[in-house]
């Protein structure tokens, strides 16, 4: 007899996500991923100036702030035939690299760690032993017994106050919490340390983009003009500030994040066999151009692109964003309808997204899984579900045989003493995120050095404004912009007519991972990877949130859809009964 | 671990327990007083408040939003966010940071609503969709509207974080497909502090919370419900590029010679002249920069319905409803030596009488220019 459990809200993510799972004999046998919030940004940008669209779609997400802005300016530049100056390309790369460092560190400590780290256990730790462990795994200077003792005292006072704030009702003492108290103390100390660190690294965005979250971008380049001999532009002080922040950021990643990740992972090796999923398809669009975003040389992108099918790392398949048969979106299980029928898949340039809610009337206990059950559409590549994100990028780099990737992955596998197959798992996903952060931290310093050497060589251009005037544009044109966001493959498609945005479609990482089933019944990554997961106590669904968090869900990103044909027809069914 | 009934530490107690001296404590209160623009005599008042007030419970709801407000909040530099959530307030519910998920999360919220009825602060990030009976945003099977009404009922006051909660923001831009609605248009029987911006500056968010806990009362609000301490001045009035505006020195296109000299961005669309916020004074991310300093105009993200206030890169005079900027336009035209027909309608008396003065400003601007070069 299966038992249906509902986890809603899933916390420590961006957005509103609900998981319903069926558990039989302590194992998940079926799972449904649902998003229950929609805003309609694509509809809102229609008719607006394409040069403004980056700012609207940037507000798709304030956690992975910048990714939709960058993808949007790339899409508009593609449509208008604009090539940005090398300095702007490097500034965009640096900002993206900073986002990776910030986002992955915050995900590890503040969104994911409490799935593995027992805060209450900190009270029984021996700070001297924590200090010894810390010093054995890292050169990070803040690792004295006194430092850890102070953190422990602070947590004790907090717990003693009786007001537990964000830690109230956590899964403390759960049988799946396996870290020694001393490692828990280490992790909680660095939870607080990382909270303070994260506000520093983003200052790179503030210098180039004026603020963070939501720094400013510009179609044609960047707005932060360079002037080495004037206080009005980027000069030696501003650039040195960036260089220092990047160095400090890299140090934190290398001396805190990675050692902690490896230390914690070594106690959870069993999670290298959980969360694998059934389909084994991994996709990356490739990113971090070193010879221009428009370069035709695939080797010039730091993250290579391609698709892996059915766990087969030996063959990497190419992707074409413009080919109408490759990337398509379905709405057979999503609260939308297509004019040509809900079982067809539409390429984003022809995309339509007419909202039509058909779920139960709130308040409800369960969604009706026989009908539609999410505001997320279901994207497919050549009809196949794809997992996107750090694991996909590392696997595709590994599959391409790129030395940087094979070395760092093999080294981590050997340290943890786990086989290559352990990559296809919840642990693999969380580890891949850390490993790629190391790569990106190194690359970002390279981008900075390239920027500095360009400036030294006399190139101070930051924006190509020749085609900013709409009178220079074709009457009708279309473009696609893509990137690898921290959470995975992201692309925007735009159609421009008479100087205005005629159609705009975003297919984002969490759309790939969190979507409902397609017409042939194939699950997407969240659902597929939950199947087979053991759940010790259905009342405390810790194992579910571990696997879901390993993807770093960003649900406001995944749901952004709404279209002009929508007549706001709502067929409300009351299906609050559950037959499980 | 469950909540107990024991007496809470006051701020003073928690600061002393954290190893700070009484002198440190007084310095902190003096800093907060100065920061919030209070007279020196208020220091004693703040010190007393912090010594006697227990940690303030906060329920932080998330509706139609992008979480940029939470992200901005954790960027605050003074106080830092760890000190706020461990020592100053009790953040009992927030989808972004809380450990518990699902019904454990909802139970934590319910516990605070019951135990601290009439005492907790409800902070709201995001707008509420009113279309189709609210089905465009559901949490734990309830609509955002139902969640808001339940949480607001026992709240002492509501903080509407960011432009989503205080004016609707991007999802309420035309055609507002989901009926996205700000909080003050739904809840009308509670004090509401609107803290607009997309997002608001982190230190502004922290400043609002510190104000409430330190002074034991809500900050003084303007007619639109915004704290005067942070929204009383236009970005234009505190902008370090203002002298170039007055001198008629403008960026004509991004990355041009004027852009490289840091001239005024008014002609490439800066909305600083009609935007009330602290960007020019507090700046962003601990004072590092703000949009204008980094070469991009302000697009007015703290103003109501700013997404529909005209194209981002179009200068203000071409935007309906912004006639007050006739002066600015005139200055620009004198400097550039052009007269645009569109601006003719804005030629109000004060502009005409000041034309001579503008000419003088332009000349002095050229002098400034020479000095900078």
Image (tube, rainbow, N blue to C red):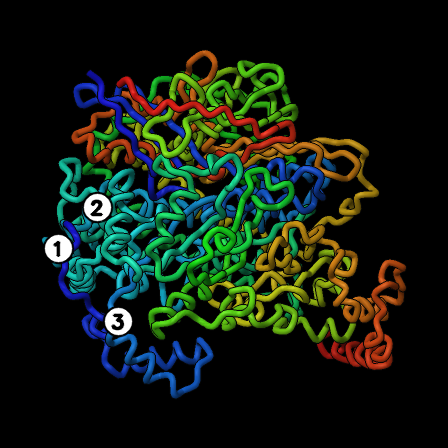
Query: Split into 4 quadrants, where in the image is the C terminus of chain A?
Result: top left
Q: Mark 3 points at which residue?
A: B53
- Residue under numbered circle 1: A123
The residue nearer to you, when weighing A552 against B40, is B40
Residue A507 visible in the snapshot:
yes
In space, the residues marked 3 and 2 are separated at their CA atoms by: 25 Å
Q: Are marks 3 and 2 on the same chain?
A: no
Q: What element carries label 2?
A: loop
10 Å neighbourhood of mark 1: few (<14), some, or many (≥20)? many
Q: Residues within 10 Å of mark 3 (few under 14, many from 20)?
A: some
Q: In this view, does A193 lie above or below B33?
A: above
Q: Residue at x 75, y 67 (%)?
A: B325
At horizontal 76% and vertical 56% (from top left) the residue drawn is B320
Chain letter of disc 3 in the image: B
In-front residue for pair A329/B256: A329
x, y (%) of residue A382?
53, 16
- Mark 2, residue position: A169
Chain of the residue displaying label 2: A
Image coordinates for residue B112, horizontal then vertical, percent? 26, 53
Numbered mark located on residue B296 in the image: none
Task: Name which residue lies at 51% across and 15% down.
Answer: A383
Res B139 → quadrant: top left
Comparing B373 with A368, the one in front is A368
Front label number (2 vs 1)? 2
Task: Report x, y in % for residue B295.
Answer: 65, 60
Of labels 1 and 3, the one closer to you: 3
Query: A8 left or right of A183?
Result: right
Give the x, y percent position of residue A251. Answer: 37, 54
- What is the secondary structure assignment of the residue under circle 1? helix
Q: Distance between the residues labelled 2 and 1?
A: 17 Å
């Amino acid at each position: 007899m299966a038992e249906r459990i509902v986890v809603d809200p899933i916390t420590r993510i961006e957005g509103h996500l609900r998981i319903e799972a069926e558990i039989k004999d302590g194992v998940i046998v079926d799972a449904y991923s649902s998003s229950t919030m929609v805003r309609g940004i694509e509809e809102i940008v229609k008719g607006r100036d394409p040069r403004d669209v980056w700012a609207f779609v940037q507000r798709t997400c304030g956690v992975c702030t910048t990714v939709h802005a960058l993808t949007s300016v790339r899409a508009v530049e593609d449509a208008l035939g604009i090539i940005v100056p090398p300095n702007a390309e490097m500034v965009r790369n640096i900002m993206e690299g900073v986002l990776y460092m910030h986002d992955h560190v915050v995900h590890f400590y503040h969104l994911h760690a409490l799935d593995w780290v027992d805060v209450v256990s900190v009270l029984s730790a021996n700070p001297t032993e924590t200090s010894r462990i810390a010093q054995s795994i890292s050169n990070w200077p803040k690792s004295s017994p006194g430092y850890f003792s102070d953190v422990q005292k602070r947590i004790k006072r907090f717990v003693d106050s009786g007001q537990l704030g964000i830690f109230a009702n956590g899964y403390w003492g759960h049988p799946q919490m396996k870290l020694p108290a001393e490692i828990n103390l280490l992790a909680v100390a660095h939870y607080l340390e990382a909270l303070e660190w994260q506000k520093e690294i983003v200052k790179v965005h503030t210098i180039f983009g004026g603020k963070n979250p939501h720094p400013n971008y510009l179609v044609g380049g960047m707005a932060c003009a360079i002037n080495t001999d004037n206080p009005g532009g980027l000069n030696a002080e501003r650039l040195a500030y960036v260089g220092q922040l990047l160095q400090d950021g890299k140090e934190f990643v290398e001396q805190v994040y990675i050692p902690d990740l490896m230390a914690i992972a070594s106690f959870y090796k069993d999670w290298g066999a959980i969360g694998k999923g059934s389909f084994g398809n991994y996709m990356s669009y490739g990113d971090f151009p070193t010879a221009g975003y428009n370069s035709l040389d695939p080797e010039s992108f730091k993250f290579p692109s391609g698709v892996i099918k059915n766990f087969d790392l030996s063959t990497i398949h190419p992707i074409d964003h413009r080919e109408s048969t490759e990337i398509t979106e379905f709405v057979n299980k999503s609260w939308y309808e297509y004019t040509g029928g809900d079982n067809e898949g539409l390429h984003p340039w022809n995309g339509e997204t007419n909202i039509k809610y058909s779920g139960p009337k709130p308040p409800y206990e369960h969604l009706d899984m026989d009908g539609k059950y999410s505001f997320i559409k279901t994207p497919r590549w050549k009809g196949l579900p794809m997992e996107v994100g750090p694991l996909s990028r590392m696997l595709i780099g590994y599959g391409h045989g790129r030395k940087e990737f094979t070395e760092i992955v093999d080294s981590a596998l050997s340290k943890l003493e786990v086989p290559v197959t352990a990559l296809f798992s919840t642990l693999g996903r969380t580890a891949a995120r850390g490993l790629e952060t190391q790569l990106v931290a190194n690359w970002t310093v390279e981008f900075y050095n390239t920027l500095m050497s360009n400036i030294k060589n006399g190139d101070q251009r930051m924006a190509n404004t020749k085609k900013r005037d709409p009178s220079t544009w074709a009457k009708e044109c279309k473009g696609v912009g893509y990137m690898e966001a921290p959470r995975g493959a992201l692309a925007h498609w735009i159609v421009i007519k008479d100087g205005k945005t005629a159609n705009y479609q975003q297919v984002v990482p969490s759309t790939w991972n969190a979507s409902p089933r397609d017409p042939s019944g194939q699950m997407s990554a969240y659902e597929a990877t939950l199947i087979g997961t053991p759940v010790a106590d259905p009342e405390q669904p810790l194992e579910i949130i571990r696997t879901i968090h390993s993807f770093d869900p960003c649900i406001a990103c995944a749901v952004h859809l709404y279209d002009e044909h929508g007549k706001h027809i709502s067929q409300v069914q009351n299906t609050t009964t559950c037959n499980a | 671990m469950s909540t107990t009934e024991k007496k809470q530490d006051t701020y003073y107690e928690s600061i002393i327990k954290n190893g700070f001296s009484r002198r440190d404590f007084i310095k902190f209160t003096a800093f907060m007083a100065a920061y919030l623009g209070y007279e020196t005599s208020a220091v004693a008042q703040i010190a007393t408040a912090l010594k006697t007030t227990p940690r303030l419970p906060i329920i932080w709801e998330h509706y139609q939003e992008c979480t940029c407000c939470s992200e901005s909040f954790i960027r605050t530099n003074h106080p830092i966010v760890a000190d706020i959530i461990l020592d100053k307030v009790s953040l009992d519910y927030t989808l972004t940071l809380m450990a518990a998920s699902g019904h454990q999360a909802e139970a934590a919220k319910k516990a605070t609503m019951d135990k601290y009825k009439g005492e907790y602060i409800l902070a709201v990030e995001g707008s509420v969709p009113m279309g189709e009976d609210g089905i465009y945003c559901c949490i734990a099977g309830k609509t955002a509207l139902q969640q808001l009404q339940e949480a607001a009922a026992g709240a002492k006051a509501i903080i509407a974080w960011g432009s989503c909660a205080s004016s609707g923001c991007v999802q309420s831009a035309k055609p507002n497909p989901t009926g996205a609605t700000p909080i003050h248009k739904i809840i009308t029987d509670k004090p509401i502090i609107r803290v607009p911006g997309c997002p608001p500056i982190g230190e502004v968010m922290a400043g609002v919370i510190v104000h409430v806990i330190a002074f034991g009362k809500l900050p003084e609000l303007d007619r639109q419900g915004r704290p005067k301490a942070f929204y009383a001045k236009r970005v234009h009035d505190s902008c370090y590029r203002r002298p170039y505006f007055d001198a008629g020195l403008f960026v004509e296109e991004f990355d041009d010679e004027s852009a490289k000299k840091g001239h005024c961005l008014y002609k490439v669309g800066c909305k600083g002249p009609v935007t009330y916020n602290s960007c020019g004074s507090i700046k962003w991310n601990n004072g590092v920069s703000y949009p204008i300093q980094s070469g991009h105009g302000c697009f007015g993200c703290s103003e109501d319905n700013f997404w529909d206030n005209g194209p981002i890169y179009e200068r203000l005079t071409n935007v309906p409803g912004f006639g007050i900027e006739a002066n600015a336009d005139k200055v620009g035209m004198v400097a550039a030596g052009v007269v645009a027909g569109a601006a003719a309608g804005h030629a109000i008396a004060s502009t005409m009488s000041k034309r001579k003065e503008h000419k003088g400003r332009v000349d002095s601007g050229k002098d400034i220019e020479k000095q900078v070069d």
